[in-house]
Image: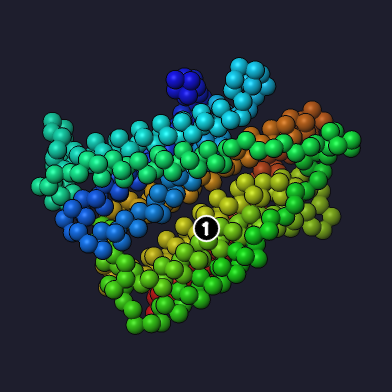
Amino acid sequence: MLALRLARGAHPLVQLRRLLVAAASAGTGFLLLCTLAYAMEHPGAGAVLRLAWCVAPIAATVYFAVAVARTDPATRPRSGLSAVGLGPGRLMLLAAISTAVSCVLGSMVALLFFLHLRGDISGLPFDGAATDLLAGGRPLPLAGALTLLSLVPIAASVAGAVVLRPRPVKATGAEAGTEPVGEPDAPARPPSGLPWGVALLAAGLAVETYASRSDVRPRTGFPMPGGADGSPAGVLAGWALTALGLVLAGPGLTYLSGRILQAARPGALRLLAGRVLQEEARRIGRPLGVLCAVASGAYASIALYAGPSPEVGPLTALGGLLVAGCAALTLATSAVEARQARTKTTDALLRLGAPATLLRGSAALRAGALAAVFVPLTWIVAELAAVPLAR
């Protein structure tokens, strides 16, 4: 009940983020139910492979739900809450419950929409509009449907609890007997994933190039839901390695962007922008890498399914839209979290007399630096991934 009362009293933007989580959960749940309907009509290995294609939308939805839970002000530790029994552990539990409620709401909407399109629920427009596609002539296994719909709420709530679990507080400079250092004065330690990310990126492109030169045709690979007959297994493995490499390299590239901004006698504007990027490298670098991986994969997919290849069906398009939308929304949510994390630093700068134009210019400079690094990288990776597929 406490989680529900906190949810009702939240800011409209917080409610909007929760509704977006519910919408993503609804789309993923509908894909899972469509996979169940396909398995009812075509039992066998093909149904299992179609279920495997739903892993990407599930992971994207869970990733977005965790990002929203991290920025939820209702679950942020505040002074006085521990005295009334709302310590870090209880707040973590509230965050997990709030995430589960949003995802369950979306799953229920997906179930109602699925039953409506099957013709099991009448009295609304488009009754039974997809009876043939959704196995409307067969009884729906309720236990299987509920099991599939529970995947996203359970995974999202568990992941949120793990991410928001209480951690031991490190001693600050004042506690250690030294003077505290402000966030613009001391850069954070560089992330350590850049070499591994570059290695995985190169390995993924190599695997994809080797697989594209073989005699394996798209129709002999994994079937995609909704129309496309399949994709070469080697190409999919290459995409997976490339995406993982971009995700691992994202924080390091963000940190490197901050270092570049501070090169060659920086002024106050470049120094502030560079230090903030270094501090936020781990927070926004990984979502940036995910978004770059999705964008490069979408570009390569266009090259793979162009020409005489089979057209992409509605369910495949829905899955791609879910992955891309969740990646973009996760990046936006992480940016909000980064802004919340540096609120004290921003207030301190304003008290010291820093003009507001300096803060706005720093934000614009950070955005430009990230675009200058990640946009060409995404384009290069997409071109290299698409060259062997276009042969």
Q: Residues within 10 Å of mark 1 (few under 14, many from 20)?
A: many
Quadrant of the rendered image containing residue 197? bottom right
Residue at figure coordinates x 52%, y 54% from the top left: 290
Rendered image coloring scheme = rainbow
Task: Give the x, y percent position of residue 230.
Answer: 30, 67
Is residue 329 something that shows in the picture? no
Q: Amino acid at mark 1?
A: Cys
Residue at figure coordinates x 74%, y 35% from the top left: 345
Residue at figure coordinates x 81%, y 52% from the top left: 266
Which quadrant does the N terminus fall into? top left
Task: Give the x, y percent position of residue 77.
Answer: 63, 28
For the residue pair 167 and 246, the one nearer the viewer reads as: 167
In the rendered image, the residue lying farthest to the left is 137
In what element is the residue under mark 1? helix
Height in image: 282 above or below 100? below
Task: Give the x, y percent position of residue 42.
Answer: 18, 59
For the residue pair 84 and 66, the one nearer the viewer reads as: 84
Residue at figure coordinates x 63%, y 40% from the top left: 338
Task: Give the x, y percent position of residue 289.
Answer: 56, 56
Please name the residue that numbered disc 1 is placed on: 292
Q: Is residue 82 left or right of residue 102?
A: right
Q: Is residue 353 left or right of residue 391?
A: right
